[in-house]
């Protein structure tokens, strides 16, 4: 079943948050999901140790550059979706995971620093696609955007990506307190307390829209 890698060599791009949101939404839609937590910070593994992790979500964190290919292959034979949260560096592990992916999601904030990190991933995807002699579908998702306004730097990055012919998700990941609270309290967006966390309904809508577009892009690429 589909393997989706989330990659950006620059830390703080919203990579782990975006990967977790997708995993939760897929599980709540009835899919079984394996998350391979290959980020050294192990944020998703820490979330999984808190109360409320959906039973349909399985987390594996003991992976290395030597084992990640076998782990992805094994889990893809069992789960409906495999999500790989990659480390924030252009390593052999990242290259191996990208080479095994059916889709690569590149989270970027609207800044030139993030764009440079994204460019490294794009070069890595091109290299792995050439080695595998197949296309590796991918797209950029803009993260931590404002719900009210689009900054000048965000518009600039989006324009540069479009001009370069880089696929970009129509749905951006909006900055929401609910997304941060997942890592503090565990569970899902649906399980958060509206009295303690603001705008949960809007956060859920945003996460669902992104995940729906992700699934649609994967299906389109498979045709």
Image: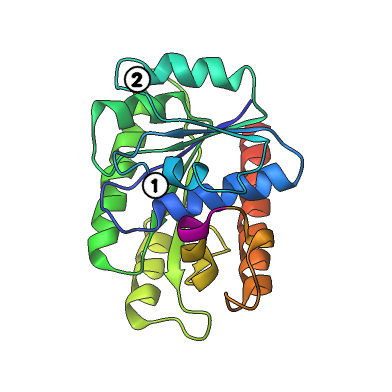
In the rendered image, is residue 206 in sight? yes
Q: Residue furthest front?
A: 51
Residue furthest to the bottom in view is: 148
Name the secondary structure under disc 1.
helix
Q: Is residue 95 left or right of residue 173?
A: left
Residue 83 position in % (x across, y down): 52, 36
**Magenta segment, principal secondary structure?**
helix
- Asked where in the image residue 7 lies, by quadrant, the reply is top left
* Residue at the spot 45% in from the left edge and 24% down from the top edge: 100
- Residues under labels 1 and 2: Cα distance? 31 Å
Placement of 213 over or under 215, stated as above or below: below
Circle 2 SS class: helix
Whether residue 209 is visible, yes or no, is no
CA neighbours of label 1 inside 10 A, class few (<14), some (14 to 19), many (20+): some
Q: Residue 218: where, in percent of width, then height?
A: 62, 39
First to last magenta residue range: 182-186
Residue highlighted by disc 2 = 131
Quadrant into which the C terminus falls: top right
Residue 17: percent from the left, percent from the top? 46, 55
Residue 174 horizontal/vertical position (percent): 51, 70
In reply to whether residue 111 is colored magenta, the answer given is: no
- Relative to 60, say whether 70 is above or below: above
Q: Say left or right for 214 vs 125.
A: right
> Which of the pair 135/172 is nearer the observer?
172
**The N terminus lies in which quarter of the figure?**
top right
Outermost residue on the right side: it is 30
Residue contact between numbered discs 1 and 2, judged by CB atoms under 8 Å: no
- At 35% across and 69% down in the image, what residue appears? 110
Q: Which residue is mark 1?
A: 43
Residue at the (57%, 63%) spot, across then down: 170
Q: Sort mark 2 into few (<14), some (14-19) or many (20+) by Cα contacts within 10 Å.
A: few
């Amino acid at each position: 079943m589909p393997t989706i890698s989330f990659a950006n060599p620059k830390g703080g791009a919203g990579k782990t948050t975006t990967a977790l949101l997708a995993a939760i939404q897929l599980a709540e839609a009835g899919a079984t999901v394996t998350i391979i937590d290959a980020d050294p910070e192990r944020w998703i593994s820490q979330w999984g140790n808190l109360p409320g992790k959906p039973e349909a979500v399985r987390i594996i964190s003991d992976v290395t550059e030597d084992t990640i290919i076998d782990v992805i292959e094994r889990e893809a034979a069992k789960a409906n979706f495999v999500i790989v949260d990659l480390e924030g560096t252009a390593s052999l592990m990242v290259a191996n995971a990208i080479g095994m992916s059916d889709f690569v999601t590149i989270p970027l904030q609207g800044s030139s620093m993030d764009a440079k990190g994204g460019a490294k991933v794009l070069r890595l995807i091109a290299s792995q696609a050439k080695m595998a002699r197949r296309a590796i579908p991918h797209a950029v998702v803009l993260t931590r955007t404002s719900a009210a306004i689009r900054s000048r730097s965000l518009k600039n990055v989006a324009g540069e990506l479009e001009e370069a012919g880089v696929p970009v998700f129509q749905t951006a990941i909006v900055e929401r307190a609910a997304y941060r609270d997942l890592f503090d309290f565990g569970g899902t967006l649906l399980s958060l307390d509206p009295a303690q966390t603001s705008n949960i309904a809007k956060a859920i809508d945003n996460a669902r829209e992104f995940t729906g577009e992700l699934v649609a892009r994967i299906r389109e690429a498979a045709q």
